[in-house]
């Protein structure tokens, strides 16, 4: 009898635990209750066009843009400002929606990192009036930035992506040249001080040659080359005046010549194309690079480009020690 009662008690306790767990899960997945502080409200809004746009990050002036017929950098009218990027930044300031009203009448702005904001933006409108936007600390729970503008004194929480769209490097305002998909190249010529190597696409993979007999590229190396070629894209522009000397591009470490075929919509015949990439000095994890004799000098991710920086046939076809042991 005692054993039966004990068993019943255990079953009741287990049932209670299951019921408690059910309600806990239900509360977790239920629609959140309306928070009185979370409101649909606009933190800043104005009508009109922005003529001048300036910003600083952590107190450091980044740039000043002025729009006449087009956006220009105030300190250098020849700077190739991406008009799409500049238009987008100006447009983003016209209406800034709030995630949350934090304080309608804030006391100490330093409490929100707004006394010395991480980002401060000033927009000058057509009528000469100015509006300032200050983005302070990030809220640890939402990753939103505390925000205040000269339009009113209330502190809001706004989407962190608004602040992050303003770059901390003026060169990020240059539109990066997009390279074609080179994964399906027909041939790749690699020229360096050490050798001239050619990689030729075959039906099943690649062959490699330094002017002599063609040799088959092992499958693992072929996959590395294929992935690397398809991933080659510039990261950012670092110079727009073809000043090659400071980047090792006057005498490039490597010159990569890709030939590839593209379908031409105006012709029934595919068109063969050629792209020449010059690779210069290494800069940390990146390399400086440019397209042939182009004026724009960019950075390329080292982990992407290094499988294509081949100095000899043997470095590609020689089996690894692990393979030799087998």
Image: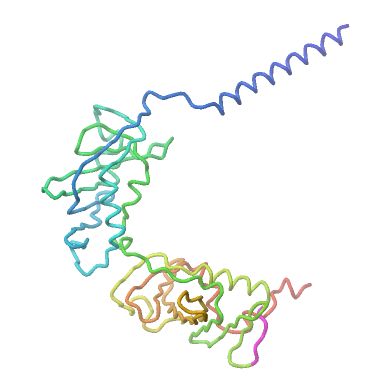
Residue at 82% across, 13% down: 7
Residue placed most toward the observer, 183 or 108 = 183
Q: Is residue 214 magenta?
A: yes
Residue placed most toward the observer, 305 or 231 = 231
Residue placed most toward the observer, 294 or 315 = 294
Residue 153 lies, with reference to residue 16, above or below; the image says below
Residue at 37% across, 46% down: 161
Residue at 53% across, 69% down: 230
Point out the image quarter for the N terminus: top right
Quadrant of residue 153 in the image?
top left
Residue at 80% across, 12% down: 8
Image coordinates for residue 68, horizontal then vertical, percent: 16, 60
Give the side of residue 212 with respect to residue 172, left or right: right
Q: Given the current orientation, which residue lies at the most extreme left position?
A: 128
Image coordinates for residue 294, horizontal then vertical, percent: 35, 78
Residue 139 lies, with reference to residue 291, above or below; the image says above
Q: How many marks?
A: 0
Quadrant of residue 67 in the image?
bottom left
Q: Given the current orientation, which residue lies at the most extreme bottom position?
A: 212
Image coordinates for residue 273, horizontal then vertical, percent: 47, 81
Point out the image quarter for the C terminus: bottom right
Give the side of residue 289 with respect to residue 204, left or right: left
Q: Which residues are magenta?
A: 213-217
Residue placed most toward the observer, 37 or 167 = 37
Q: Is residue 302 magenta?
A: no
Q: Main SS type for the magenta part?
A: loop
Image coordinates for residue 186, horizontal then vertical, percent: 56, 80
Q: Given the current orientation, which residue lies at the most extreme right position?
A: 1
């Amino acid at each position: 009898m005692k054993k039966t009662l004990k068993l019943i008690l255990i079953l009741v306790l287990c049932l209670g635990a299951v019921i408690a767990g059910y309600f806990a899960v239900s509360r977790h997945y239920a629609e959140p209750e309306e928070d009185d502080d979370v409101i649909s409200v606009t933190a800043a809004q104005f009508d009109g066009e922005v003529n001048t746009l300036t910003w600083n990050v952590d107190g450091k002036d980044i740039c000043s843009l002025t729009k006449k017929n087009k956006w220009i950098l105030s300190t250098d009218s020849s700077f190739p400002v991406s008009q799409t990027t500049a238009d987008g930044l100006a447009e983003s300031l016209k209406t800034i929606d709030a995630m949350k009203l934090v304080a309608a009448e804030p006391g100490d702005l330093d409490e929100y990192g707004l006394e010395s904001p991480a980002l401060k933006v000033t927009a000058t409108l057509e009528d000469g009036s100015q509006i300032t936007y200050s983005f302070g600390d990030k809220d640890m729970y939402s990753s939103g930035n505390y925000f205040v503008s000269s339009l009113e004194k209330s502190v809001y929480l706004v989407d962190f992506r608004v602040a992050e769209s303003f770059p901390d490097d003026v060169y990020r305002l240059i539109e990066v040249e997009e390279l074609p998909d080179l994964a399906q190249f027909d041939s790749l010529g690699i020229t360096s001080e050490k050798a001239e190597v050619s990689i030729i696409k075959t039906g099943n993979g690649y062959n490699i040659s330094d002017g002599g007999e063609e040799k088959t590229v092992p499958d693992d190396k072929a996959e590395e080359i294929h992935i690397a070629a398809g991933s080659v894209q510039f990261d950012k522009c670092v110079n727009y005046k073809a000043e090659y000397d400071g980047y090792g591009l006057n005498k490039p470490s490597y010159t990569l010549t890709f030939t590839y075929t593209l379908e031409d919509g105006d012709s029934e015949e595919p068109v063969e194309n050629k792209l020449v990439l010059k690779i210069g000095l290494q800069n940390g994890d990146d390399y400086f690079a440019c397209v042939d004799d182009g004026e724009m000098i960019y950075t390329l991710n080292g982990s992407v480009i290094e499988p294509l920086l081949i100095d000899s046939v043997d470095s590609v076809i020689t089996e690894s020690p692990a393979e030799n042991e087998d």
